[in-house]
Amino acid sequence: MKTLTILSGKGGVGKTMLSSSLAVLFAKQTKVVACDCDVDASNLALALGIEESAFEWQEIETSEKAKLIEEKCNGCKKCLQSCVFSAISWNEEKNKPEFNRFLCEGCGACSLICPENAIEIERVKNGRIGSAKSMYGFTIVSGQLKMGEAGSGKIVDALKEKALAIAEKQRAELLICDSAAGISCPVIASIRGSDFVVAVTEPSPASFRDLKRALQIVNYFNIPYGIVINKWDINKELSEEIERFASDKFLGRISYDKKVIDAIVNLTPVVETECKAAKEIVKIKGRVKTQLYKP
Ligand code: SF4
Ligand code: SF4
């Protein structure tokens, strides 16, 4: 089985739009499972017209937090200085420490310092993952980080594990991952193990700069990649510069097309509509396929 990941350095440049269309196109030829790795802002299911209620969700614990065992605490205050995340404050009334759940990173430093073993590091439910069937015949696996919680990279690991298990069970030949944007932990977790990465950018200086940063991670893992320019015609000069930068890794351009916006608003993958951008994406899919199955 192959794994294809769609990535962008900057959010909002058309990554999920392209992911949904590529999933639909590949699913017409091969058995596909799609995985929305953007757990901070998961939108792939929506782009495919799937409501949250269609998912079978399961809560997961991939994060840890400090918890006080009050009866053991003698009020010595030694833990107060141990937290570099400023997650511990002092409750004068109780004469005991208080832990801010939103600031605590579960590093365990306070529990090591406590002479009374009054601080436990407990696992917390920080997100949920689930799967649903799309109307295009393939299963999508999605996940969400709970508000204010940390550990999105680990949720992506759990998501991919679930997606791979489903793919194996369904004898799928292709796993398509819609990565988180940026260069943080979830992105690293998204692209790790991929056979090919499609990096999407718009012709704006910020998108181009963020694309280059994201590609540093792709190169670190030595994964082959190709570049797509979305809305290339809003800045033709910069698009040409990006094409030169991409060189033989250039996969194609998608035009600015009002019908793309209509498709997104109507929760329909662009390639399921009649428009110029849809035809361009079909050509891009052909090039991605060639690269993905290159011997
Ligand atoms: S576990 Fe780490 S981050 Fe959390 S309160 Fe203790 S020292 Fe601070
Ligand atoms: S170090 Fe332990 S015993 Fe001392 S105040 Fe903190 S939790 Fe209580």
Image: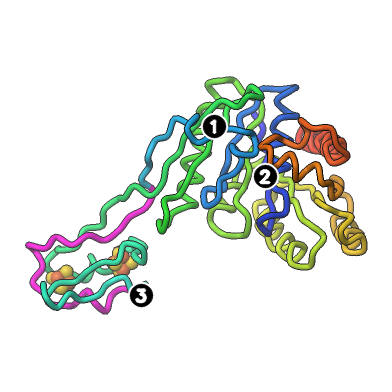
Q: Is residue 251 visible?
A: yes
Q: Secondary structure at mark 1?
A: helix
- Return the x and y of residue 109 as percentages of the image width and height: 29, 68
| Label 2 or label 1, whichever comes before in sequence order | 2
Q: Is residue 295 visible?
A: no
Q: Nearer the viewer, residue 13 or 65?
A: 13
> Residue tagged by mark 1?
164
Identified by mark 1, the residue type is Leu
Q: Nearer the viewer, residue 289 or 273?
A: 273
Q: Secondary structure at mark 2?
A: helix
Range of magenta residues: 62-83
Identified by mark 2, the residue type is Thr
Q: Quadrant of ligand 1?
A: bottom left
Task: Give the tally of numbered discs.
Answer: 3
> In the drawing, what numbered circle is on residue 84?
3
Q: CA distance from mark 1 to mark 3?
A: 37 Å
In the picture, which quadrant includes the C terminus?
Answer: top right
In the picture, which quadrant includes the N terminus?
Answer: top right
> Residue tagged by mark 2?
16
Q: Using the image, determine if residue 194 lies above or below residue 83.
A: above
Mark 3 CB near ligand 1 (8 Å cut) = yes
Q: Nearer the viewer, mark 2 or mark 3?
A: 2
Residue 155 located left or right of residue 178:
left
Q: Using the image, determine if residue 49 lies above or below residue 197.
A: above
